[in-house]
Amino acid sequence: MSIHHPATRRFLKTLAGSLAAVSAAPLLASAPPREGVDYRVMQPTQPTDAGNKLEVLEFFWYGCPHCFALEAPLNEWRRKLPADVAFRKVHVALGPSWAPHQQLYYTLEAMGKTAELDEKVFAAIHLERQSLDKPERMAEFVSRHGVDRKAFTDTFESFSVKTRMRKATQQAGAWGLDGVPGIGVNGRYYTAPSMARGNTQALQVVDHLLDLERKARK
């Protein structure tokens, strides 16, 4: 079923409304986030690539339904990020079946197409039930969205993409990932919706951890 199909549009509208309601939920009540429960401290601290900015990493997989559910509230949160925060997505492959989607993501990243096509890839996989697990299926998909098929295929097999994949795999190991989605905060903290008991709550934990980092810099 196409994303333009009326039923799909109705589903997306309902999903957006539901997520908007969730994102409007009250902030974490009474007690602040708890170390060892809502987040963990990284030992050792991980390197960051954001210069003087505070770095937030989202670890995800295109095929993960929980990552798909996080997309809308995460994108809303990102639109309000202060200037001292740099956000970056890291597509991991915690198993062999995840690797094709990881390669797809880093191909799109290398081509400067992630902002344009991320939501479309998620919708294709989770709403339209396209597996996008083979290079030819990926090439056909991106070509329907205005990406040159040969350029995509050439980039897909490039050294640059393979290098990005290796770096993401190394990061996943260094951060001790055993599932997705997960969020790393400035190399020092890790949280996840599964730890914070919800997508909105996880983003509130991230805001709390960013405040801790700001205070530590003063």
Image: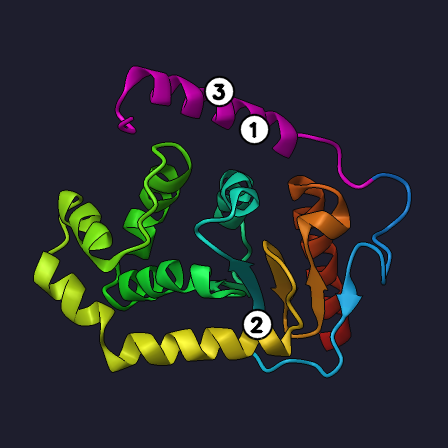
**Residue at (16, 65) in percent of width and height:** 153
User: Is disc 1 placed on a helix, strand or loop?
Assistant: helix
Q: Which mark is residue 20?
A: 1
Residue at the image point whose x is 20% and y is 50% from the top: 142
Q: Residue at x 65, y 64 (%)?
A: 178
Q: Is residue 30 magenta?
A: no
Say which of 44 and 138 sits in front: 138
Q: Amino acid at mark 2?
A: Ala
Single out the mark in the foreground, 2 or 3: 2
As drawn, 135 above or below 13: below
Quadrant of the image occupied by residue 22: top right
Instruction: Label the magenta part by its dominant secondary structure.
Output: helix
Pick the front one: 174 or 87: 174
180 in relation to 45, above or below: above
Across and down, in percent, residue 80 comes to: 53, 47
Camera-nearest residue between 113 and 166? 166
Q: Vertically, is 80 above or below 105?
A: above
Q: For residue 49, say whether it is visible.
A: no
Q: Tell whether 93 sits left or right of 182.
A: left
- Neighbor class of circle 2 (other Cα within 10 Å; few <14, some 14-19, many 20+) is some
In front: mark 1 or mark 2?
Answer: 2
Q: Which residue is mark 2?
A: 172
Tell me the residue that label 3 is attached to: 14
Task: Report the Cα–Cα distance between label 2 and label 3.
Answer: 33 Å
Instruction: Answer with mark 1 or mark 3, whichever residue precedes in sequence.
Output: 3
Residue 81 is situated, as x and y percent measured from the top left of the image, at: 54, 53
Callouts 1 and 3 close, C-beta under 8 Å: no
Q: Is residue 18 within the magenta segment?
A: yes
- Mark 1, other Cα within 10 Å: few <14 / some 14–19 / many ≥20: some
The answer to the question of whether label 1 and label 2 lie on touching residues, with beta carbons closer than 8 A, is no
